[in-house]
Amino acid sequence: MNKKLMIPLVLFLVLTGFLFAGLWRDPREVPSPLIGKPAPQFALAQLANPAATLGTADMKGQVWLLNVWASWCVSCREEHPLLVELAKAKLVPIIGLDYKDEARAGKQWLTQNGDPYTTSVMDRDGRVGIDFGVYGVPETFVIDKAGTIRYKQIGPITPEALEKKILPLVRELQKS
């Protein structure tokens, strides 16, 4: 066979192999480059009290969850009852990052569906979400006492993810 034809054929086969292998990967298991690195710094207006701010510096010394949500997010409705139950158990503070949303719509959504958040902050332009590498909502981050991201859940939290990954990690981090 002609060498000029072999190179494109080999490249095609390699690319096809990568694409084929990707079919069996779970998109929720996309590794985040931020795992093990300090959480991006932010200080944003609180949803309930826009005159007050909350940021990563306020959470130092605590293990906490950052849950990225929005009133327009359909998948957020799926995980929301689980977050409400988690908040009732008071195992870990949950900070909400209301992503690319109108404050009025976010407040109304929490009033209708229950508010599991210790505090929600507004990320109207999505810049903080970008800093955290958010692909879409919902996403949840486990952040340790030093402010380091230890886990990222892409998509809605499921009972299985909560019981097998998130809560065991939270308990372990709270001990140290």
Image (tube, rainbow, N blue to C red):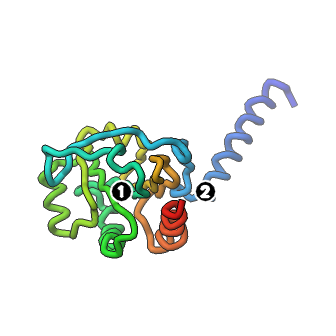
Contact check, label 1 and label 2, Cβ < 8 Å? no
Q: Label 2: few (<14), some or many (≥20) within 10 Å? A: few
Reading the image, the residue beneath label 1 is 67
Q: For the image shown, how many numbered marks are present on the structure?
A: 2
Q: Quadrant of the C terminus?
A: bottom right
Helix, strand or loop at label 2? It is loop
Q: Position of residue 98 (x, y in %)?
A: 26, 51
Answer with the quarter of the image where residue 129 lies.
Answer: top left
Q: Position of residue 32 (x, y in %)?
A: 53, 46
* Residue 166 appears in the picture as rendered: yes
Q: Label 1: few (<14), some or many (≥20) within 10 Å? A: many
- Residue beneath the point at 23% across and 66% down: 115
Answer with the quarter of the image where residue 41 lies.
Answer: top left
Picture layout, residue 149 above or below residue 6: below
- Residue beneath the point at 48% across and 68% down: 167
* Lower sequence index among marks 1 and 2: 2
Q: Nearer the viewer, residue 15 or 152?
A: 152
Q: Is residue 62 left or right of residue 8?
A: left
Q: Position of residue 11 (x, y in %)?
A: 73, 34
Q: Quadrant of the N terminus?
A: top right
Helix, strand or loop at label 1? It is strand
Q: Nearer the viewer, residue 146 or 86?
A: 146
- Residue beneath the point at 47% across and 69% down: 162
* Residue 78 appears in the picture as rendered: no
Q: Amino acid at mark 1?
A: Asn
Give the farthest residue toward the top.
4
- Residue beneath the point at 47% across and 53% down: 144
Q: Amino acid at mark 2?
A: Arg
Reading the image, the residue beneath label 2 is 25
Q: Position of residue 117 (x, y in %)?
A: 27, 62
